Image: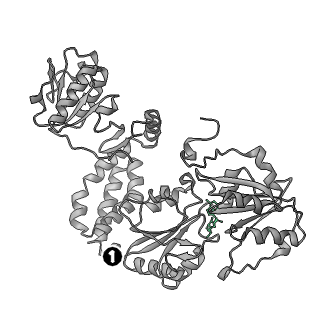
Amino acid sequence: MDHLPIFLDVRGKKVIVDGGTTVAARRVERALSAGADVHVYGTVFCDEFQPFAGNSDLTCHKRPLVADDFTGAIIAYGASEDDARDAHLYALAKAAHVLVNVADVSQYCDFITPSVVDRSPLVVAISSGGTAPVIARILRARIESLLPPAYGRMAQFLGGFRDKVLDGIKITRARRRFWEDMIEGPVGDQFLAGDIKGAEAHLTQALEAVGDGSELAQKGEVFLVGAGPGDPDLLTFRALRLMQRADVVLYDRLVGKEIVELIRRDAERIYVGKRPDHHAMQQEEISLLMVKLAKEGKRVLRLKGGDPFIFGRGGEEIEILAENEVPFQVVPGITAASGCSTYSGIPLTHRDYAQSCHFITAHGRDGVLDLDWDVLLRPNQTVAIYMGLSSLRFMTEEFQRRGVNPETPAAIIDNGTRPNQRVLTGTIGDLYEKAMAEEFKGPSIIIIGGVVKLRDKLKWFTEDPKGKFSMSLVPQGTL
Ligand SMILES: C[S@@+](CC[C@H](N)C(=O)[O-])C[C@H]1O[C@@H](n2cnc3c(N)ncnc32)[C@H](O)[C@@H]1O
């Protein structure tokens, strides 16, 4: 992040705008709507200043700015479209230690002006750090359409209860939970449906029932959530919602930074990642930690790569929760085989090549492989191998030793669905040799079967090994 997002309280404070242009008028409008005492400087003011005529919070000075004008100012905008004036404004602002923004002149900007969705008191500000304002504008339009104006009114309505809730519920965690339950539950529904009296009655009743919140604060639970294979766009809505509710999160090595950043900011983060031969925390320790945290009354988010119930030991983890009577819920995620298949253009089934598909792990209990080879060797099927990179040589040799044609197509998808995805195709006979040259670090899925041939035709995802762009912004064909 190149800029620190903050919302500035400018009510009654002096804001300077230099210029009489259209851009200056926009700055004046925004500063006035935030309650600032606006001082604008210019000799000619465009027609767009007319709506402000008579506004007691605006003072128009028909003269150039001087150093004394900065006394008491909090920020300054330059919008004169005159290079010399911009330079002068910037120098004066710096001398007075006032933060300044000159439109379209990045070297004269201490801050940027974001695109804004205004549902006051709810305000969403979007910035692309000055690099791609068009994206910020497109996003703004999307958010405008997602946020009905009633949200602003709902925030105002709930604001009316704020002090009562503060007085009644003394424990911060309980207060947050109370609001979450109200907004995502019947109160939110009633308000948005126009039943304001109903929403008010419900909230009042719920507030009485909750008392001082001590019981609510003790209600710990665990959310076991699948985070998918890497691309944050593949998270489910439910996953995202629960990620906002957690008090503490336990996350794995396979959960990328982009996803971790979507978790509620104030949630405590505990890394419990495992590497093939190095365990940050033993499996049982993780489960017992979840039990302990939930019994302390916390909402624990257990975030796992892919799907928690597919080679994720999610089942084992919640068995321990069940034994300890800790309430839990499970959210499925897109499993790696599925994500890798779609992002590599290799369908797992296809009428011409495979009528079934097997997901297997090449990493057995204590590292010992115990595979049902008779099933795996059947024709017209796909085999997707998890955790197979370190036993690739053994697996490909064993398939051949047991009679599989060495020409059978095979592929490795490394870091599937991520910007640095790499796909290697070959055959059972040559995949190991080819993979050695690629030096894959994983995580990787191996796919074996005729479906691999389809990649040449069905490949759609632009691989970007340096990981500079994220997939969501750069689908193939748009650059
Ligand atoms: C412990 S398993 C967890 C699987 C996970 N629960 C799932 O449903 O995808 C870890 C293995 O999943 C595979 N994997 C996970 N994410 C991957 C990705 N983005 N690309 C390729 N393989 C991945 C790799 O085989 C890795 O070794």
Q: Is residue 4 left or right of residue 373?
A: left
Residue 66: where, in percent of width, then height? Answer: 12, 25
Q: Name the residue: 25% across, 56% down.
A: 161
**Residue identifier under label 1:** 215
Q: Name the residue: 22% across, 61% down.
A: 164
Q: Is residue 188 left or right of residue 284?
A: left
Local crowd at mark 1 within 10 Å, few (<14), some, or many (≥20)? few
Tell which of 258 and 404 is nearer to you. Answer: 404
**Mark 1 CB near ligand 1 (8 Å cut):** no
Q: Where on the image, by quarter, is ligand 1?
A: bottom right
Quarter of the image with the C terminus in it: top right
**Looking at numbered disc 1 in the image, what kind of residue is underneath it?**
Glu
Give the answer, above or below, for where 343 lies relative to 100: below
Secondary element under disc 1, as helix, strand or loop, is helix
Looking at the image, the residue that sits furthest to the front is 437
Q: Name the residue: 56% across, 45% down.
A: 472
Residue 145: where, in percent of width, then height? Answer: 46, 39
Q: Name the residue: 60% across, 71% down.
A: 312
Tell which of 2 and 288 is nearer to you. Answer: 2
